[in-house]
Image (tube, rainbow, N blue to C red):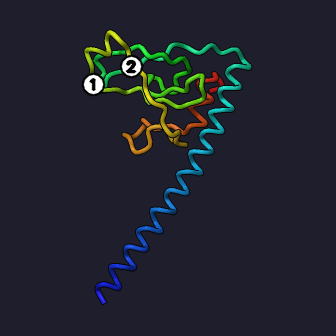
Amino acid sequence: MTQDWRERRREAAGAHADALARRQAVEHAQARALIAEFVAEARRRSIAPVPLRARSYDGRHRYRTPLQGWYLRRNESVAVGTDGELYVLGVPTSVLALVRGVTPEPSEPPMVLGKGGRDGESIDLPDALRIALGDA
C-alpha cells in the first residue's frame, strides 16, 4: 500500500513538473515576442541603444560589456540587447573584469521582471518595455 502511494505521488510530481515546464515555455515565448516587437519599435522610432554595463552583485563595481541595448529597470539591472535577448546584468565581483569587462549570458525572458522580489521591485514586462519606449 505505501509503495502504491509513493508511486502515485511520484507520478503526480512528474505531471506537475511537466505542466510547469509547459507554462514556462509559453510564458518565455510570449515574452520573446514582446521583446522582438520592442526592438523593432525602438529602431523604428530611432531610439538609440546605449552601451550596457554590468554591475557586481554587491553593487560596488560596474563592468564594461560588449553589449548595446536598452535598460528596462531604473537600477540598470536588466536590459534588452540589440540582438533581441534579455540580459540580467548582475555578475560576481572580479578584479580581472575591471580590466577586461564581462560578457553576460542571455536569460530566458519572464513576463514579470523581479518576480518574487521585495514589494515594489517587480514590474510586468509589457510595462517595462513601454517605459523604455517613453510611452509611460
Residue 102 relative to residue 133: left or right: left
Q: Nearer the viewer, mark 1 or mark 2?
A: 2
> How far across and down, in percent of the image, does residue 47 sit?
65, 15
- Asked which secondary structure carries label 1, the reply is loop
Residue at mark 1 to residue at mark 2: CA–CA distance: 16 Å
Residue farthest along the top direction in this orientation = 99
Q: Which residue is mark 2?
A: 102
Give the residue drawn at x 66%, y 32%.
Answer: 36
> How far across and down, in percent of the image, does residue 59 sit?
31, 21
The amino acid beneath tag 1 is Asp
> How far across and down, in percent of the image, does residue 83 sit?
59, 25
Residue 48 relative to residue 64: left or right: right
Q: Which residue is mark 1?
A: 58
In depth, the one of 25 and 31 nearer the eye is: 25
The N terminus: image quadrant = bottom left
- Rendered image quadrant of residue 102: top left
The amino acid beneath tag 2 is Val
Give the residue drawn at x 41%, y 69%.
Answer: 13
Q: Identify whether 95 is placed above or below 127.
A: above
> How far across and down, in percent of the image, does residue 87 sit?
48, 29
- Rendered image quadrant of residue 34: top right
In depth, the one of 22 and 118 nearer the eye is: 22
In depth, the one of 49 and 128 nearer the eye is: 49
Q: Identify whether 99 is placed above or below 6.
A: above
Give the residue drawn at x 35%, y 12%.
Answer: 100
Q: Residues within 10 Å of mark 2 (few under 14, many from 20)?
A: many
Q: Identify whether 89 is placed above or below 25.
A: above
In depth, the one of 30 and 121 nearer the eye is: 30
- Asked which secondary structure carries label 2, the reply is loop
The circle on residue 89 is none
Give the residue drawn at x 61%, y 45%.
Answer: 29
